[in-house]
Amino acid sequence: NAGVMQNPRHLVRRRGQEARLRCSPMKGHSHVYWYRQLPEEGLKFMVYLQKENIIDESGMPKERFSAEFPKEGPSILRIQQVVRGDSAAYFCASSPRIGFEQYFGPGTRLTVT
Amino acid sequence: AQSVTQLDSQVPVFEEAPVELRCNYSSSVSVYLFWYVQYPNQGLQLLLKYLSGSTLVKGINGFEAEFNKSQTSFHLRKPSVHISDTAEYFCAVTPPADSNYQLIWGAGTKLIIKP
């Protein structure tokens, strides 16, 4: 059973460009979580999605950031008009049901130049 | 609101020595507790979890943790560390009553093994 997959592993964008981060949850998992980890800091929750629904986006910046988890295909975290402060590692986690532990992907390291 | 405090940002320890990584949480309701490990340039891996039952929880790689409700702590221990344990360790909690089951994270503790 393949683990949580994220791509790309590394992404470099210039200021003002768009970044698209993909997450394929483990097979059978319908709950997806996105986290951001800034250098020397812990994980910060961004958004929690189930198939086709955003359940909790309280950790997501109001502007430029959006997330989706379509019926088919991976979950996408989209950052429009990136700025240097968006440089971070973005982790995706999935779980098979609510209340279960989360399984993490290897992360996407975004660098904004 | 719940919060998690990992009191030490770094813990240096000699190889084969015991180690304890501290985690305290604040919550007015019961919680589930987790320890995750992050090796350099990798994602997080679950070490162990406490949901209910015995307060002493055994995890992978020889780690264990003890839930102390009166002290609201969930300290991680290993009797003898190896170079391969060099990593960052994160404590997390989630209140079962929270319908979103959002994990609340500590800032992490870097375990540095000295040869």
Image (cartoon, coloured by chain):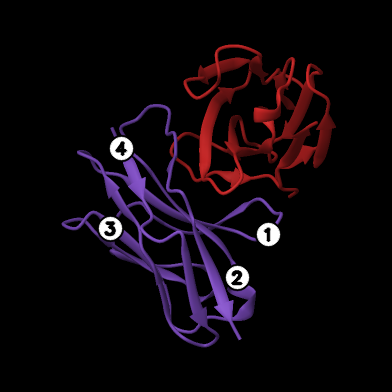
- Rendered view: B35 above or below A68: below
Above or below B14: residue A33: above
Q: Depth-wise, is mark 4 or mark 1 nearer the camera?
A: 1
Q: Secondary structure at mark 4?
A: loop
Parent chain of label 3? B
Quadrant of the frame with the C terminus of chain B: bottom right
Q: Mark 2 or mark 4, which is nearer the start of the sequence?
A: 4
Residue assigned mark 1: B40
Residue B14 spot, x, y in % from top left: 52, 84
Amino acid type of the residue tagged 2 in the rendering: Thr
Q: Quadrant of the N terminus of chain B?
A: top left
> Which chain is represented by purple in the image?
B
Chain of the residue under label 1: B
| Residue sitting at x 83%, y 25% | A14
Any part of residue B2 in sight:
yes
Q: Which chain is the one coloured red?
A: A
Give the letter of the chain under mark 2.
B
Kindly identify the amino acid type of the residue bearing the numbered disc 4: Gln
Q: Are marks 4 and 3 in contact (CB under 8 Å)?
A: no
Q: Earlier in the sequence, mark 2 or mark 3?
A: 3
